[in-house]
Image: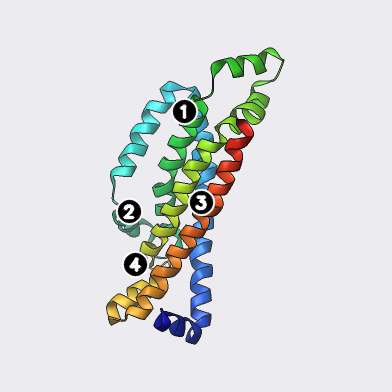
Amino acid sequence: MHDVLEYISSHQSRYINAIITHLTIDIIALTICFAIAIPLGYLCAKKNKLAIPVLNVTNALKIIPSVAKFFILMPFFGIGIVPAVIALVILAVPTVLINTMSGVQGIEPQIIESAEGMGMSRMRVCWFVEMPLALPMILNGVRMAVIEVVAGTTIASYIGAGGLGDFIIAGLSQNNRAVMLTGAVTVAVISIALDIILSIVQQRALRRIQ
């Protein structure tokens, strides 16, 4: 670790820029993922005819290895952040979508019927009853998706997206353990920190509905 800290201290600007790039890609990909997967997961939970083809597609996407997703997109989108973000969205959407479906489908029908019997509109039932009750399960999918995306962004360095994966690639090519660990350890620390934070949020959401 001494060599890693020494390398970071002597390459602070590059290190900070790599973290910023890495997190920027993560934020963009996760924002798009949530915007697609949560509404679509809710609709699939309510409409079986929609759920079947959507689940077939998501299951097919999950079968494709993560590395392959990045390189399949290269002929269409070139290299850089754009194909990286698209690949990461494809990687994360199935996880969030399936957990959203499970969360909504796990709500007792009597609860929804009671809310509708009180005169609540379909939209209000969704926002104020179903989504809060499904939130712990949705957050479970969010946690898994965040880890997948943070880890997956390291692979995105192979297609020129930048980020902390650049250190891993450089370390491997130069046979420099300190450089490689700079990227790997930082990604691990970010993943663990985010997982802890989201775990706390999930536990609080769970306590609210119990």
Three-letter residue code for mark 3: Leu
Q: Earlier in the sequence, mark 4 or mark 1?
A: 1
Distance from the alpha carbon under mark 2 to that under mark 1: 25 Å
Which disc number belongs to residue 67? none
Left or right of 114, for residue 141 = left
Q: Earlier in the sequence, mark 4 or mark 3?
A: 3
Above or below: residue 127 compared with residue 122? below
Q: Residues within 10 Å of mark 4 (few under 14, many from 20)?
A: some
Distance from the alpha carbon under mark 4 to that under mark 3: 20 Å
Q: Quadrant of the C terminus?
A: top right
Distance from the alpha carbon under mark 3 to that under mark 1: 20 Å
Residue designated by label 1: 44
Residue at 41% x, 41% y: name it: 94
**Which element is circle 1 on?**
helix
The residue positioned farthest toward the top in the image shown: 117
Q: Quadrant of the N terminus?
A: bottom left
Distance from the alpha carbon under mark 4 to that under mark 2: 12 Å
Above or below: residue 169 compared with residue 93? below
Above or below: residue 67 compared with residue 116? below
Q: Earlier in the sequence, mark 2 or mark 1?
A: 1
Residue 32 x, y percent position in the rendering:
52, 48
Asked whether disc 3 touches disc 1, contact meaning CB atoms under 8 Å apart, the reply is no
Three-letter residue code for mark 4: Tyr
